[in-house]
Amino acid sequence: MSAALWYALAAAVGNVLGGVAVARSARASLRFIEGLVAFGAGFMLAVAVVELLPEALSRGGGEAAAVVFAGYLLVHLAQHTAIEHFHFGEETHAVAPGAAVAALVGLSIHTFFDGVAIASGFAVSGELGILVFLAVLLHKLPEGVSISSLQLAVGGSARRAVGAASVLGLATVAGVLLTGGVAFLAAHGLALSAGVTLYVGASNLVPEFQAKPGWRLPLAFFGGAGMFFLTRELLRAVAG
């Protein structure tokens, strides 16, 4: 089994844990996840801008830039155009029954590209693969929370809520498995991953906390960005 697949499986567990936190009404855990959204946004944006974008552009030039933008647009289409209701975090309002299904489809597309990102990162180097994995892992719990709470909001059972989170995890694994076998993903997976990661960090995660009062979440955001640079240096020290 490839390293990328092992890491994808570990990331998928994060989706399931987020679903379990909602199903068990673990309020303390959900408060922690709110902070994780901010921390993960900082880490993800650092990975996208400092690592994924330069690597993708150096390999594909102008064509890669167009694919990066296509990845950004694809996630917006899947999560905020084709579906009627979506946000990261716990759903506390009643929603239409179809919203949960549509959100599951939209998020599954996104998590599929999480797997593509992990596989593409490891195809470049172990260091980049681990950095991408960490960026993905940090938003896996919030994804699980989001989809599971939507299932409960439309009257679904706790088992159905955790099952929906598990589907997201399986989509991530599928992304890894298909990246090497689909020519377009093998050639442009890195650029697509850059666009998807930029969207999730800047357009999904940051809006979830930027209007909230206090310093806890902004500090977590900057802490996530700082942790990226620290982690990168630690990985280089271990490798070198």
Image: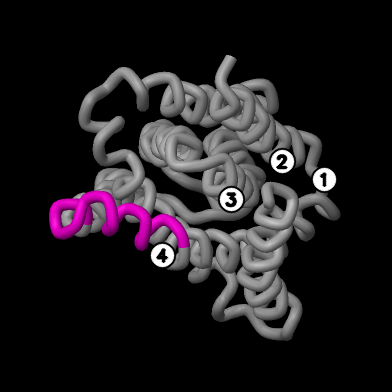
Q: Distance between the residues labelled 3 and 1?
A: 29 Å
Residue 203 disc label: 4
Tag 2 secondary structure? helix
Task: State which tag comes first along the sequence, 4 or 1.
Answer: 1
Residue 176 placement (x, y as % from top left): 45, 26
The residue at which mark 1 appears reads as 26
**Which residues are the magenta region?**
51-64
Query: In this rendering, is residue 121 above or below 211?
Result: above
Find the residue positioned furthest to the right. 28
Question: Given the current orientation, which residue lies at the most extreme front position?
Answer: 240
Residue at the image position 59 percent from the left and 26 percent from the top:
3
Q: Are marks 3 and 1 in contact (CB under 8 Å)?
A: no
Seen at 69% across and 27% down, the residue is 158
Compute the Cα span from label 4 to label 1: 27 Å
In the rendered image, which residue does mark 2 sit on?
22
Marking on residue 151: none
Frontmost of labels 3 and 1 is 3
